[in-house]
Image (cartoon, grey):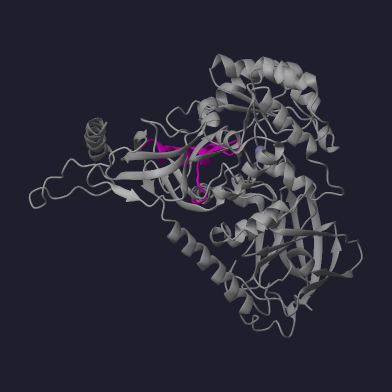
């Protein structure tokens, strides 16, 4: 066995040195010739292993370079191998999250910190997916999780997926389905995600693909030999999607307990389901994200923006029950249908990486064994998405590994006690990740204890007397529209007759995420935090086309503002917005936007005597 290990080592080392050395070429005349040795040889000795399907109480796992080269009882450890302290620990394959939305490279960084080595994205922009995918091919993406992505989803005009303010192409007839699918594949989509959701599962009324168009698009995907995954939110949609040929469903539903007809259809068609229990639990219960954020095994790696996401909740008049989804997960699993661990991060109540650990707990709560839950996050998604190089601890597989303290076969929450993460054999520096998070929190604390901006004591921001657009403190007023994300909204700011006139037009194609208005930066520079906690209420006079949008940006919540709509009329009137109702404590306010109504077309509004109280 060890002989074979060394042969593979030599091959791996040659390939690596030849193709992807990150170091600049060295001067060969002064440097000794590079020895043919593996860049790293790791040995996990006498460790409990979950191999992707079952637990093995005691085994040795050998890694050479980026590959697992041996697993067996009491294997000899080659000389020179780094012995990883694994006593009392369990070694898992790197985890998958089979349903996320990636908005930037940092999402994949954060996923890896929590042991998620592969994310299956269910809708992002193709340009971002391309930028993230490219370095994966040559091993340059080792500090973050790998990505597979649906790219742009297939939805009807005005359907789910069009509400995020980013214009996307839509599909409205079967005859266009083949060209539509081909366009997605040309953009780089790894599979096709479709939306079959008329909103009724959540008491809404939304346009959606009709059955013929759904079927035509699924068939088009199949002709190109890629998977078709269909988003649904009710049981009848789930059954219709299965009968239309879906390979997989995105989401379980909450509207009904699973029927025999549903379970039989899923079984007969051999589908899989990205159950997204983690996000469903956030709409049902809304407290699990906070529990994750408080877990001492996870908290030191959770930064302010993630914590904000975990504590966030779906707005809901009443909380539905998650029992139907938990029952579906169990019944499908018992029928042999692959239920894939998936979170739908970063939706409210979830965050990349960390929420996968709650998803595993929810699968166990549904009635799956810990081994079945872990398989749903390792071997099964690898098989479903054709990633045969990973998802298992077996000879020849990628060394994507997570070492956790304790025994997840007895307590699934042991997956949270992460001792180490390796991607393609490279150890992640979790100490550095923790230090970065600590620094983010230190920045929050600095903002909280920072003195208020000079001038806040007097309270006045602008009375718009004089000709110039100026403010008594802060970095002043600036134009702000959705043009910064490619929109066509416009705005003009003019000081006239002792007030500020804000006129413009709202790009209807981007609603509800279109905006046009004026942004006041209370910090010394644009988007730097200002401590407004001493005078937390924004007061202004206003008139014009309402409702007026007020958005508050804080450092801790990142790019996503909190928003209030203020009803205004044709006559001047004073309005007050208590920032504490939007952002708890307004100690790190980086911008306050005041703008036009969320409806397409021209608007005109006037503001005056803007102050904090
Ligand atoms: Zn989703």
Q: Quadrant of ligand 1?
A: top right
Nearer the observer, 459 or 275: 275
Residue drawn at x 65%, y 31% as measured from the top left: 169
Nearer the observer, 556 or 477: 556
* Rendered-image quadrant of the N terminus: top left
What x and y, as percent, mark residue 106? 51, 51
**Residue farthest to the left, as pictured:** 29
Residue 348 painted magenta? no
Nearer the observer, 433 or 533: 433
Residue 551 appears left or right of 527 = right
Residue drawn at x 74%, y 16% as measured from the top left: 212
Residue drawn at x 56%, y 57% as measured from the top left: 297
Residue 569 appears left or right of 103 = right
Q: Is residue 352 visible?
A: yes
Nearer the observer, 348 or 517: 348
* Rendered-image quadrant of the C terminus: bottom right
What x and y, as percent, mark residue 196? 74, 27
Q: How many marks do you count on the picture? A: 0
Determine whether 493 is above or below 386 in the image.
below
Determine whether 588 is above or below 94 in the image.
below
Q: Is residue 579 visible?
A: no
The quadrant holding residue 503 is: bottom right
What x and y, as percent, mark residue 610? 77, 74
The quadrant holding residue 9 is: top left
Give the magenta part as a residue range.
Answer: 113-138
Determine whether 200 is above or below 608 in the image.
above
Residue 130 appears left or right of 475 = left
Residue 128 painted magenta? yes
What x and y, as percent, mark residue 337? 65, 24
């Amino acid at each position: 066995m060890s002989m074979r290990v060394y042969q593979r080592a030599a091959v791996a080392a040659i390939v690596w040195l030849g193709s992807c050395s990150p170091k600049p070429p060295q001067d060969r005349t002064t440097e000794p010739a590079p020895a043919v040795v593996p860049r790293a040889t790791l040995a996990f000795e006498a460790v409990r292993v979950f191999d992707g399907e079952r637990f093995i109480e005691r085994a040795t796992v050998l890694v050479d370079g980026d590959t697992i080269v041996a697993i067996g009882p009491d294997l000899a450890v080659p000389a020179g191998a780094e012995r990883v302290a694994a006593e009392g620990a369990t070694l898992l394959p790197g985890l998958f999250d089979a349903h996320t939305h990636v908005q930037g490279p940092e999402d994949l960084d954060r996923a890896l910190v929590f042991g998620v080595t592969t994310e299956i994205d269910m809708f992002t922009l193709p340009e971002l997916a391309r930028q993230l995918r490219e370095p994966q091919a040559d091993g340059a993406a080792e500090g973050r999780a790998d990505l597979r992505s649906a790219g742009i989803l297939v939805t009807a005009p005005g359907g789910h997926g069009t509400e995020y303010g980013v214009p996307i192409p839509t599909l409205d007839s079967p005859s266009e389905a083949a060209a539509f699918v081909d366009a997605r594949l040309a953009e780089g989509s790894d599979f096709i995600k479709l939306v079959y959701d008329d909103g009724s599962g959540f008491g809404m009324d939304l346009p959606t693909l009709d059955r013929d168009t759904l079927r035509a698009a699924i068939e088009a995907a199949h002709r190109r030999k890629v998977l078709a995954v269909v988003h649904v939110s009710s049981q009848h949609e789930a059954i219709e999607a299965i009968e239309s040929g879906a390979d997989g469903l995105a989401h379980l539903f909450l509207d009904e307990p699973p029927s025999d007809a549903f379970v039989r259809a899923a079984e007969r068609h051999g589908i899989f389901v990205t159950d997204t229990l983690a996000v469903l639990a956030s709409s049902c219960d809304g407290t699990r994200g906070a529990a994750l954020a408080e877990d001492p095994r996870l908290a030191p790696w959770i930064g302010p923006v993630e914590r904000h996401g975990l504590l966030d909740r779906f707005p809901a008049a009443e909380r539905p029950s998650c029992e139907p989804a938990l029952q579906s997960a169990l019944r499908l699993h018992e029928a042999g249908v692959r239920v894939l661990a998936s979170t739908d991060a970063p939706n409210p109540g979830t965050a990349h990486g960390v929420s996968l650990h709650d998803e595993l707990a929810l699968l166990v709560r549904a009635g799956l064994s810990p081994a079945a839950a872990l398989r749903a996050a390792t071997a099964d998604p690898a098989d479903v998405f054709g990633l045969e190089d990973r998802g298992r601890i077996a000879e020849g597989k990628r060394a994507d590994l997570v070492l956790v303290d304790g025994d997840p076969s007895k307590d699934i929450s042991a997956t949270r006690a992460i001792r180490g993460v390796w991607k393609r054999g490279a150890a992640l520096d979790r100490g550095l990740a923790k230090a970065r998070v600590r620094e983010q929190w230190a920045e929050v604390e600095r903002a909280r204890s920072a003195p208020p901006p000079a001038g806040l004591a007097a309270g006045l921001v602008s009375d718009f007397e004089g000709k110039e657009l100026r403010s008594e403190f802060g970095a002043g007023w600036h134009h702000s529209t959705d043009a910064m994300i490619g929109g066509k909204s416009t705005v003009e700011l003019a000081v006239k007759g002792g007030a500020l006139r804000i006129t413009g037009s709202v790009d209807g194609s981007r609603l509800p995420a279109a905006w046009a208005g004026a942004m006041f930066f209370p910090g010394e520079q644009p988007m730097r935090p200002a401590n407004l906690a001493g005078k937390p209420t924004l007061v202004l006079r206003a008139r014009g086309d309402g409702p007026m949008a007020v958005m508050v940006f804080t450092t801790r919540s990142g790019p996503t503002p909190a928003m209030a709509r203020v009803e205004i009329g044709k006559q001047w009137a004073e309005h007050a917005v208590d920032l504490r109702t939007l952002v708890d404590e307004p100690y790190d306010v980086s911008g306050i936007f005041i703008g036009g109504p969320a409806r397409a077309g021209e608007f005109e509004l006037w503001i005056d005597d803007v102050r904090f109280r």
